[in-house]
Amino acid sequence: MVIPSVLPERPTAGTPFETGWPVRLADTDGDQRLRLDAIARYLQDIGFEHLDAVEDGDSHRGWVVRRTVIDVLKPIQFGERVTLRRWCSGLSNRWCNMRVQISGSSGGLVETEAFLIHFGTESGVPARMSDRFMEPMLASTTEHRLRWKAALTDPAPSIDSPEVHVRPFPLRVTDIDLLDHVNNAVYLSGVEEVLADHDDLKSGAHRAVIEYAKPLKSGDQVELVAHRAGSALDIWFTVAEETRAVTRVMPL
């Protein structure tokens, strides 16, 4: 099983990095639920705060997200204050799994895990993390030989199938980051577009997994190819029928 059914528990050794803030209106949908794209931004924000708090954080500023798992156990609502706790749940010397627990002041709870690749900001290729940077990460997990394995491997279905729904996903200037890539949180806003037609999935506890295969860039003509099979909803982000990312949303 590539992704465990229950994400790794908080470590008994070490102290997770902790921060928090209120859930604001721009983070929530019409039902006052904290959206998936807002959760992805929260993961980015705590990640950069964490870098500022650790040894050699200033020399480890380049990261690529390969996969994010978001388990919405109890929806977090507008007006709650969230506490975020972040720790390493597995690593090699160039990439790691980082867990973030998001708990709301009124009982909302979201558990997440992201596979992150460290890369050199000048070289643009995966780069070894320093020993000082890895020291607290090694202490929080026994998984020190982490390897990448995709969990979502099904190809995009034919768009001619009656069970497949295709919609355009126009990119905006504000979606693009300094590398001319679409920010990873923007993909989750596309997932929210499709989820709007599947209230049964987002109303209860659910898991959303997104894996990024190839970056979306400014000017790309993106289509969302969605297929619902039973309780699972799959969404492919495609450009000229080439898959750039894939998502699965399913109940927990």
Image: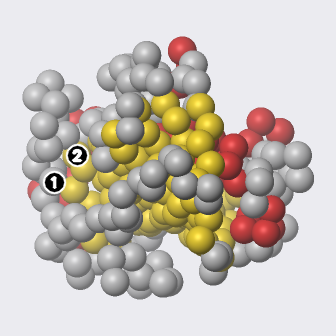
Residue at the image position 87 percent from the left and 51 percent from the top: 32
For label 1, the crowd category at 10 Å Cα-Cα, with few meaning under 14, some 14 to 19 and many 20 or more, is some
At which x and y percent is residue 250? Answer: 60, 72
Pointer 1: what residue?
94
Q: Count of labels shown?
A: 2
Q: Which numbered tag is attached to residue 118?
A: 2
At which x and y percent is residue 249? Answer: 58, 65
At which x and y percent is residue 188? Answer: 57, 46
Asked if residue 88 is positioned above or below residue 239 in the image, the reply reads below
Q: Is residue 158 left or right of residue 77?
A: left
State the separation of the CA atoms marked 1 and 2. Answer: 6 Å
Q: Circle 1 — which element? A: loop
Residue 1 in view, yes or no: yes
Q: Amino acid at mark 2?
A: His
At which x and y percent is residue 184? Answer: 46, 40
Q: Amino acid at mark 1?
A: Arg
Asked if residue 82 is positioned above or below residue 23 in the image, the reply reads below
Q: Circle 2 — which element? A: strand
Picture quadrant of residue 95 = bottom left
Tag 1–tag 2 contact (CB < 8 Å): yes
Asked if residue 79 is positioned above or below residue 5 in the image, the reply reads above
Name the quadrant of the C terminus: bottom right
